[in-house]
Image (spheres, rainbow, N blue to C red):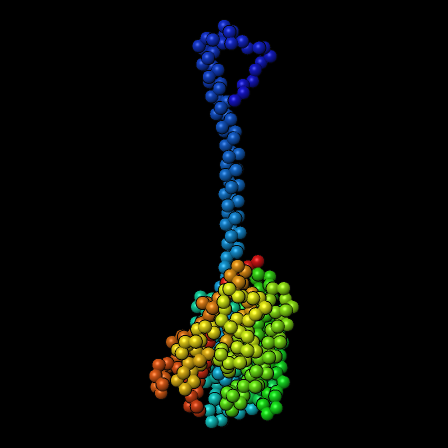
Amino acid sequence: MFLLRNNRQISPQSKGYGNSEKRVAVTIIFFVVCAWGIGFLTPFCVVAQDFSYKQGAHDKQDSLSKERIPFRVVSWNIENLFDTHHDSLKNDHEFLPDAMRHWNYSRYKKKLADIARVITAIGEWNPPALVGLCEVENDSVLRDLTRRSPLKELDYRYVMTDSPDLRGIDVALLYQRDLFKLLSSRSISIPPLKEHRPTRDLLHVSGLLLTGDTLDVFVCHLPSRSGGAEVSEPYRLHAAQILRTEADSILNARLHPQVIIMGDFNDYPTNKSIREVLEAEAPSSDTLSSSKLYHLLARKAKSRDFGSYKYRGEWGLLDHLIVSGTLLNQSGNFFTSEEKANVCLLPFLLKEDNKYSDKEPFRTYKGMKYQGGISDHLPIYTDFILIPY
């Protein structure tokens, strides 16, 4: 602390400086100046402290802005979602009110409500971000599902194919607009092979994520096993090869390819369409490659009690979730893992299997008999972590 001096030099030997009264006066002045100095500096300390607090709050807010957002992807064959009106260009007579199945508006409305309930339940606390659907008849049933069923509360949008399938069934993708901004969608036709009837188109959808990256989604329903698995296999291999070519065009063209392939392949993970054509294998942390495809459920499917479909008492996985290697990179801003993928086993999706014991999917019809169930397939899903850009 420096005290101001007057124009005269003050000498320590000065007589006046040594007396007690002046010592007291100087002491008082010293403490007054000190007190003044502290009072003067305090606001600066408060400002500095406030700045430090605000900076900390800003850092905390910045940290929160990078909060991990759940992003669930679902794939489900919903088994013959037909309306009750005849399409003159399609063979949909089986699902008309005057047909043997006696499909009517009340049954149709119940099925819509049940599907909505399942999708809502799969989402738990958040609606699934993406839902791939197989066996939807037309745009009308998708509009009814998203706008006139309980699902309307979740505000889904959708895109779908318009395929040459003789029965008129197609595939569709429901999406949440706040998590997936639609960029484009297109149908990829499968030219029919000799002696095989036309099949469903593949659906390719591109959307923008909150990470700033593009996500490419393929929804598929490959040719059925009608006539026998071996006889019909060439048609599935043909469709899988077209799918592989389309996926490769994305994997090779994008700097950061993010690809999801899902749907009902009418084949198991060990069949040629999956194992040899798509070359989709269970992930291995030692050999992950951004240009390869990985099957999220292949390892679990080796268990005899695991599957999305039950045939003659045996569970099997006909529905698949396949991703590019980029989406398994845990250091990225959008990723998943095989541990996050599973079959959905909600109790109301199952019923007692009286013939083979255990449980089986609670389907709408068993043969021609109406059961009032939902589907012969169980939904499959995986959870992604999304870190906004």
Side of 376 where 291 appears, left or right: right
The spot of residue 60 in percent (x, y) is: 50, 50
Report the residue at 57% width, 62% height from top.
210
Quarter of the picture holding the C terminus: bottom right
- How many dots with numbers? 0
Image quarter for residue 217? bottom right
Report the residue at 54% width, 20% height from top.
2
Report the residue at 51% width, 52% height from top.
63
Q: Which sits in the foreground, 159 or 147?
A: 159
The spot of residue 211 in percent (x, y) is: 57, 61
Side of 311 where 167 appears, left or right: right
Q: Which sits in the foreground, 82 or 333?
A: 333
Q: Is residue 24 visible?
A: yes
Relative to 220, say whether 104 is above or below.
below
Image quarter for residue 388? bottom right
The spot of residue 125 in percent (x, y) is: 44, 66
Residue farthest along the front direction in this orientation: 286
Report the residue at 53% width, 62% height from top.
329
The spot of residue 358 in percent (x, y) is: 35, 81
